[in-house]
Image (cartoon, rainbow, N blue to C red):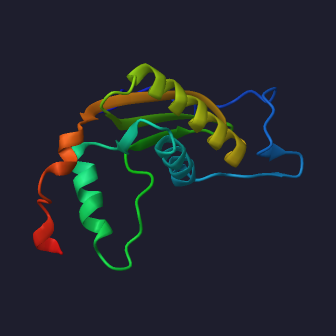
Amino acid sequence: MPETHSSPAAPQSSTVSSPLVTEKGSTTIADNVVAKLAGIAAREVPGVHGLGTAARRAFDTITERIPGSQTNVSGGVSVEKGEKETAIDLTIVVEFGTSVVEVAEAIRRNVIRSVEQGTGLTVVEVNIDVTDVHLPEDDERPDEGSALS
């Protein structure tokens, strides 16, 4: 479970500029918007097998088989968001043979770029919890959920 972080949601001084707060009004961005952008950006990084804990990934696999269901791109993503800043926690599984350090650095770069460009929020931190390594033989196991097909 990701650590609890000091919230960037504390009141910001008016000296911090933001495209979201202007003389003519303010724009608010929902937490789930930030979580989806971060989830998509993290999944784009080579070496990331998936996001979320084993239970979350198993649940997502089952729900994807339901006709009309939508893919959950924000599973494994937790967001703390203020008016102008956000902090993001990711839970990931890496592919065997990849450098965890390099994958984590690439995720941070991609998530920060995607969230800042997409929302105008300043990303103050991206914390990554690597919970597992996906092995090639994991794909060779029989599909335990085949009874659901």
Looking at this view, is 15 or 49 the one in front? Answer: 49
Residue 50 percent across, percent down from the top left: 36, 45
Q: Residue at x 52, y 24 (%)?
A: 105
In the rendered image, the quadrant that contains the C terminus is bottom left
Does 74 sit left or right of 20 as displayed?
left
Note whether 97 is above or below 64 in the view shown: above
Note whether 116 is above or below 3 in the view shown: below
Does 28 sit left or right of 143 as displayed?
right
Looking at this view, is 11 or 37 the one in front? Answer: 37
Residue 123, quarter of picture: top right
Residue 144, quarter of picture: bottom left
Looking at this view, is 130 or 127 the one in front? Answer: 130
Q: Residue at x 15, y 60 (%)?
A: 143
Whether residue 83 is visible to the viewer of this picture, yes or no, is no
Give the residue at the far bottom of this rendering.
Answer: 67
Residue 99 percent across, percent down from the top left: 40, 22
Looking at this view, is 38 or 4 the one in front? Answer: 38
Note whether 10 is above or below 149 in the view shown: above
Q: Residue at x 78, y 28 (%)?
A: 16
Residue 59, quarter of picture: bottom left
Residue 90 percent across, percent down from the top left: 42, 36
Give the residue at the far right of this rendering.
Answer: 23
Residue 41 percent across, percent down from the top left: 54, 44
Note whether 43 is above or below 107 in the view shown: below
Whether residue 46 is visible to the viewer of this picture, yes or no, is yes
